[in-house]
Image: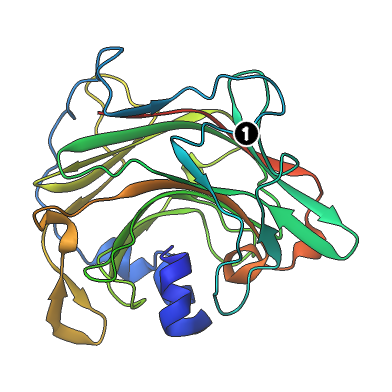
Amino acid sequence: MDRRTLMMMTGAAALGAAAIPSPLANASPVRPSPPSQPPPDAAAGTYLFQDEFDGPAGSAPDRSKWIIQSWDDPVNPPIAGHYRDDRRNVFIDGNSNLVLCATQEGDQYFSGKVLSHFRGQIGTTWEARIKLDCMHPGLWPAYWLLNQDPLPDGEVDVLEYYGNGDWPPGTTVHAASNGRTWKGKSIPGLVDPAWHNWRVHWGEEGFSFWRDYVDGAEPYFTVNNNPIPVHGRPGDLRWPFGIPGYWLQAIFNLAVGGSGGGDPRQAPYPSAMLIDWIRVW
């Protein structure tokens, strides 16, 4: 993905290269076998960060936990939909779900994006239960982790669906926001409109990813902590994720249009991304 910082720095061409895992990215890395099991689930009450999105229908998510974005991302090409802090686009549905809803009002599009106040560090596992009722042309939902310090940068795209018709859904680790420093995996067989639990473990060994984890399950994708070369500059290696004090925050968003979404006129409105819960331990 590296969708926001990447597009600001490198433009659409770089985004196309960085956001969608290529055959080269999937075929070339040689990695040791991943660990057979991730750290065990945290017992209730021991989470570093948790939100079950309980609350009355039509209310806002807990503002002590979330920033509701109310500004457009300064990206190129621009996202057609405007993010806003409005209960038509970001709300609790009364069934313990956070809803990010894309809407059309006349010739304008609106949607939702939330960023956690919580910042986690290495040695954490992040899991969210998500339903994509927005797998349509023109839309671009994602669950991702981001470091927003100017330097070092970095991003982990746990789940990303592209409605542009050109890129399959993917999971990607970006070691820099230059659009040329990433490892990713296309996961079209794992992404559908049903509820799924999307988990990532961030450890000294790197990142491991699961969908609907059960005890003993192997990750569907692993990125080891080997520095990632900048494409075209093999001697320029990046891996910020082990720097002492380095942090990531959780982001959920449903973009309308843009490079990943495609033509927003093709999407049905309203369309929604639902998040049942997020837990970090």
* Amino acid type, callout 1: Ala
Write down the residue under mark 1: 60
Residue positioned 69% across, 61% down in the render: 82
Q: Residue at image x 27%, y 67%? A: 153
From the top left corner, tell me how far across and down residue 280 is, in percent. Answer: 30, 31
Left or right of 272: which side holds 71?
left
Q: Tell which of 9 and 68 is nearer to you.
A: 68
- In the image, farthest residue toward the front: 64
The answer to whether residue 204 is left or right of residue 68 is: left
Foreground pick, 279 / 194: 279
- Measuring 26% from the left and 27% from the top, which residue is drawn there? 217
In this view, 217 is above or below 119: above
Q: Residue furthest top?
A: 44
- Residue 177's spot in the image, x, y percent? 33, 72
Q: Position of residue 160 (x, y in %)?
A: 49, 52
Q: Is residue 246 above or below residue 35?
A: below
- Colour convention of the picture: rainbow
The quadrant in which the N terminus is found is: bottom left
Mark 1 surroundings within 10 Å by alpha-carbon count, few (fewer than 14), some (14 through 19), many (20 or more): many
> What secondary structure is marked by label 1?
loop
Query: In the rendered image, which quarter is residue 91 located in?
Result: top right
Split into 4 quadrants, where in the image is the C terminus? top left
